[in-house]
Amino acid sequence: MGYCSGRCTLIFICGMQLVCVLERQIFDFLGYQWAPILANFVHIIIVILGLFGTIQYRPRYVTGYAVWLVLWVTWNVFVICFYLEAGDLSKETDLILTFNISMHRSWWMENGPGCMVTSVTPAPDWAPEDHRYITVSGCFLDYQYIEVAHSSLQIVLALAGFIYACYVVRCITEEEDSFDFIGGFDSYGYQGPQKTSHLQLQPMYMSK
């Protein structure tokens, strides 16, 4: 009963992860955030494999899914540090999330709740010709906190998925071991103790 409950919970967690990361992938595409797009794509593939392993009783797939979740948590912690400008990171000048190939920022920067975008003319000399120079004001919630909330949700789901993945792998392994134990008797056949005779044979002499 416990194993079935843990397995069903892990399936639910994987489903939630897929829904949340697909939503995040859409907005990362809109914001041209290439590094998060690549990370999200890998995460989607591995979550699908973990879901397949959970449904099909494949402990190796579930183990690989659990290992990936450790890396996924690390990535999301980095994203949080980036947007909160921890250490030497700067969300304004560093272009890590776009692989330094564009000056795009998070989609939420211009499209957050209540945000008003105003174009600034003339644009500074350092601004690329294919980019517009804008100011954003009136946001109810700054874009960096929306990105932090997205990453925090991913961390919570990843921690829950890691715990249940370890539990499911242990249950599958124990179940396989019990089947092997029972199968050992069936394959070789069980033979009960045989009765041994305590009678001693005596030689017989026949007279001619």
Image (cartoon, grey):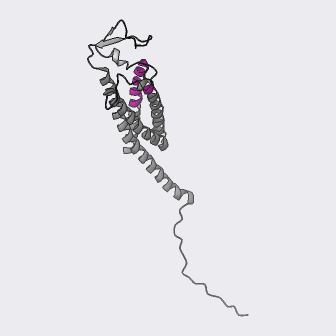
Does the magenta run of residues contain 163?
no
Residue span colored magenta: 16-37
Residue 18, magenta (yes or no): yes
Q: Residue at x 26, y 17 (%)?
A: 140
Q: Write down the quadrant of residue 188 in the picture.
A: bottom right
Secondary structure that dominates the magenta span: helix
Q: Position of residue 10 (x, y in %)?
A: 39, 37
Give whichever of 182, 59 is nearer the camera.
59
Image point 69% across, 91% down: which residue? 206
Name the residue furthest front.
Answer: 125
Q: Where's residue 190, x and y in %?
A: 53, 62
Q: Residue furthest bottom?
A: 207
- Tell me, yes or no, if residue 128 can be seen here: yes
Residue at the image position 44 percent from the left and 30 percent from the top: 39
Q: Is residue 205 left or right of residue 167?
A: right
Q: Nearer the viewer, residue 187 or 56?
A: 56
Q: Is residue 8 visible?
A: no
**In which quarter of the view is residue 135 placed?**
top left
